[in-house]
Amino acid sequence: MSISRGPATARSAGRGLPERWNATLVEAAATFPCDGLAPRGFIALTRAIDVDTSPPMVFRWLCQLRAAPYSYDWIDNLGRRSPRQLSPGLDDLQTGQRFLIGTITSFVPNQHITVRGTPEAERLFGVIALTYQVVNRGASGSRLLVRLDVHPPNRLWKRARYLVLAWGDVIMMRKQLHTLKKRAESSASR
């Protein structure tokens, strides 16, 4: 995470919900790898959670998002339960691989995974760029940050679409981050 603020970043860093959940103002104003994939004037949605384990363990659980969403399975996983154990091979990342609602554009092991929305997702919600980033907190563990950059709404119907996306993301991402935290901490204690 960089502390600088890019010129394309929208006004959302200082706001609360739905643009910012559990992230500091500094985190919300920071530049993330996905910011370069977003359209000029994008709106940044930033989410964060502390995890009491090492960045490699948190990152390994992030790789599990290739298999399942880890939020409310009955909504976004067709009722199938997200795996509760690490699946072999999911940490073998490559650009172009499917990752949630997008494809991986870049990654740095134990640091971040950056994704651009698929054409199908972007037809529904507009441009979507996403970074999951793990930051070392020293002996106390890790900080897991998520930045979702979305197209700024410039029409009434796009504003409605944005509000559904932003508020829905707060609900789903909060659950996802809590689940990943629990799984990573549980794996580390074994």
Image (cartoon, grey):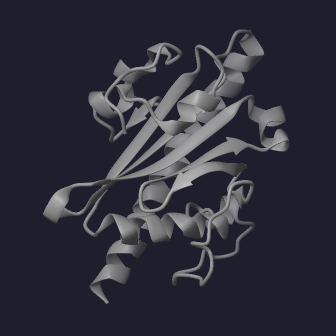
The answer to which quarter of the image holds residue 13 is top left
Residue 15 visible? The answer is: no
Residue found at x 78% / y 35%: 122
Instruction: State the residue at coordinates (67%, 35%).
Output: 128
Residue at point 68%, 56% (across, down): 100
Frontmost residue, 4 versus 26: 4
- The image position of residue 65, as x and y in percent, is 60, 64
State the image coordinates of residue 130 (x, y, percent, origin top left): 58, 41
Q: Is residue 33 above or below residue 57?
A: above
In depth, the one of 93 and 66 nearer the eye is: 93
* Residue 49 in view, yes or no: yes
Quarter placement of the N terminus = top left
Q: Residue 127 appears at what percent x and percent y?
A: 72, 30
Residue at point 28%, 69% (across, down): 53
- Give the quadrant of residue 91: bottom right
**Residue 45 falls left or right of residue 182:** right
